[in-house]
Image (cartoon, helix red, strand yellow):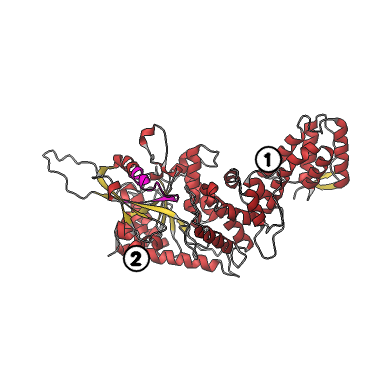
Amino acid sequence: MPTTVRGGTRVARQRFDDVQLELIEAVVTVLKEPGGGLMSEGARRLWRQMIDEALEGLPQDTYPAPHLEFLSLVHACAGRHGGMAVLARVTGLVAPALGGQLQPLLDEWRAHETFEGRNWRFLREALQPRLPELAALVAESTSGRHVLPQYCATPWQAFVYLAGLNSPVGGLPPAMDLLERLAVSPLLASSVGELRAWNDHFADRWGLDKGDDGLRSLRGELQSAHRAARVPVAVAAHGAYDGTADTGPADGRQEDEAEPPLIRLYIRVARDRAPQPSSRRRIPRPPRYHVAACVKYADSPALQRQPEAEPKGPVTGDELPASVAQLLANMTVMWHNRAENVALEFFLPLELLTEAVEFWDRDPTRGFENPLLSTYRVSVHSLDRIQRREFHRAWRSRWTQWRKNEAQRKEPGSNPEDGRRVVHECASEPALAIHHHLTRLDAAVGSDNDVVGMLLCEPPWDQGELGMQEVSLALDLGVPVLMYQRDGAATPAWRTAMREALAEEGLAALPRRTQQWKTDAAAGRLFAHDPATVRAMGMIWDDPEHLLDGGPSAPATFVGGTD
């Protein structure tokens, strides 16, 4: 920690992060409230004297304005262990009207110290709705040892309050226990992914995921209880995340428990192969596509075709968004008596992989953007990969190897940073011919079975172009996950965003993270990356266990690719 010399004494100089600076500012704002009790000089003198007695060595500088005096003292207390608690306690004695307002901020300060190293912006937003059962959930999370304080009105305030309590021996911290209970609340259904991703991260860091009192055990018990009570455990509609990023299957499902109820709508878009009508002028018509769909419900093992909801004939590429919107409108009528959330899984031919399907409008007649990702979890699969069985062995091999590596990485004594390269970043040199680049790519990825993802140089636009050839090579080598910039060659901004998404939570959590980013970009929320860069994130996510396995209920039996 940097130091400075003042009066012959070496004093530590604290560096605060953004969250701490925001809290310091909020505390100062509370202290400056007119009529709060600290704006008179006499009250501030007593307040300062009591704090100086409790914390020795604080700076004794004087300032002409109360704001600067408050800021100086709060900043100094924040740099001392326990200093903010002393500040809040003394303020409550000298100015009781302000003490209650400082307590939630003190809880946030402690929670930030406990759960360090992870951005909690999304979690804080998710925990703002008020729940009538919040007091009961806090009691359950603490085994009745604590009650919800009166100043805690939201799940967020309850979470940061519990973050300051001790954990039971061998058990989960009360704050993490509360998040698991909140995750099965219907009023927080759209935030399940963020709540569980938070807990997965810290359970992994602190070794609290396994065992009778671990995270997995509690999550399984809560889900079983809600299924028994016939209360659907909702999954986040956008960026849903149903399991542990590092230990569960990569589509977010738990290894040893059933996925929470979810309607899966599989949408196949296949090229119309009918011959063109003869014409003397031989004017080529634009490609046409057949749209078909089937549904899989959590309470039924069978795939269910819904031909009455499908378009009656082939449509052009320009007509596809409207056709899918009509398909969904027809399907929602059939789902009027169901409460589950819906996942849309598109199977697209190679020439349509650059379509931003998640940004297609649910109702194009509304006159404003209303993208699918606002309501649905959206994923894209390669129709060609599933239909061509010669691709399946290499595809299964890489996926199995990845699952094996992830399991080994979680074993006691293993090195979590074992150096395996999971994602290969393609980078072509301007002076290098395409065939030389592809030769190098084939050698690099083909000889490394640990690679399950590729960042492509270009999107798969046209046959013969670099992007399409990279995709074709990836299908041949069995690489399950492909990422590309839809609107052109990969830019530095896009590569930086993809690297950050991968580094934050790993490849397994990438679908949830990127869809959350796209949802934020569509909503106009503050974002660390350019919205256009985020919208351009294209991804093929092909999980062979989900798409090929399951006998008659496997999606491949509908899409094609099995006998």
Q: Which residue is mark 2?
A: 551
Image label count = 2
Q: Amino acid at mark 2?
A: Gly
Where disc 1 sits, the SS reads helix
Q: In the current view of this chain or complex, which residue is farthest to the left?
A: 280
Residue 297: x and y in percent read 39, 56
Dots 2, 1 in contact, CB < 8 A: no
Residue 433: x and y in percent read 35, 52
Q: Vertical placement of 425 versus 33: above or below?
A: below
Residue toward you, 51 or 531: 51
Q: Which residues are magenta?
A: 327-348
**Is 399 situated left or right of 560 in this image?**
right
- Camera sees residue 272: yes
Q: Which residue is mark 1?
A: 22
Where, by quadrant of the figure, is residue 214 drawn? Answer: bottom right
Q: Earlier in the sequence, mark 2 or mark 1?
A: 1
Residue 97: x and y in percent read 78, 36
